[in-house]
């Protein structure tokens, strides 16, 4: 299987993270992803040495609490 992490853009990560956290909190969450390692995968030379893939990034999450009871 190819490494699918390298195909994720910042906006795709933001969407995936905000959607998951929003569902968990039952609140609309905004996510801003930055500081991604480029490329978004370990060095190409290291790919064949194992199955583990890593990706590094910073995500800032924000939401406004509702007054729900």
Image (cartoon, rainbow, N blue to C red):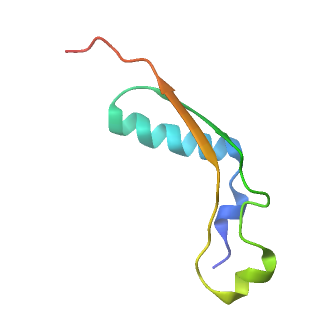
Q: In the current view of this chain or complex, which residue is farthest to the left?
A: 69
| Among the 4 quarters of the image, the one containing residue 54 | bottom right
Q: Residue at x 38, y 26 (%)?
A: 27
Q: Is residue 65 left or right of residue 37?
A: left
Q: Quadrant of the C terminus?
A: top left
Question: Percent x, y for residue 63?
Answer: 46, 23
| Among the 4 quarters of the image, the one containing residue 2 | bottom right
Q: Quadrant of the N terminus?
A: bottom right
Q: Is residue 64 left or right of residue 4?
A: left
Q: Residue at x 34, y 33 (%)?
A: 25
Residue 46 versus residue 43 in the image, above or below: below
Q: Residue at x 64, y 50 (%)?
A: 57
Residue 60 versus residue 36 in the image, above or below: above
Q: In the current view of this chain or complex, which residue is farthest to the top?
A: 67
Q: Residue at x 65, y 63 (%)?
A: 5
Question: Percent x, y for residue 61?
Answer: 52, 32
Count of residue discs: 0
Between 57 and 31, the one nearer to me in the picture:
57
Question: Percent x, y for residue 4?
Answer: 65, 66
Between 51 and 57, the one nearer to me in the picture:
57
Question: Percent x, y for residue 36?
Answer: 71, 50
Residue 15 versus residue 4 in the image, above or below: above
Residue 56 versus residue 65 in the image, above or below: below
């Amino acid at each position: 299987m190819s490494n699918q992490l390298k195909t994720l853009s910042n906006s795709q990560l933001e969407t995936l993270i905000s959607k998951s956290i929003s569902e968990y909190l039952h609140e609309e969450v905004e996510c801003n992803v930055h500081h991604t390692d480029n490329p978004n995968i370990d060095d190409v030379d290291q790919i064949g040495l194992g199955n583990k893939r890593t990706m590094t990034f910073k995500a800032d999450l924000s939401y406004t609490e509702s007054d729900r009871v």
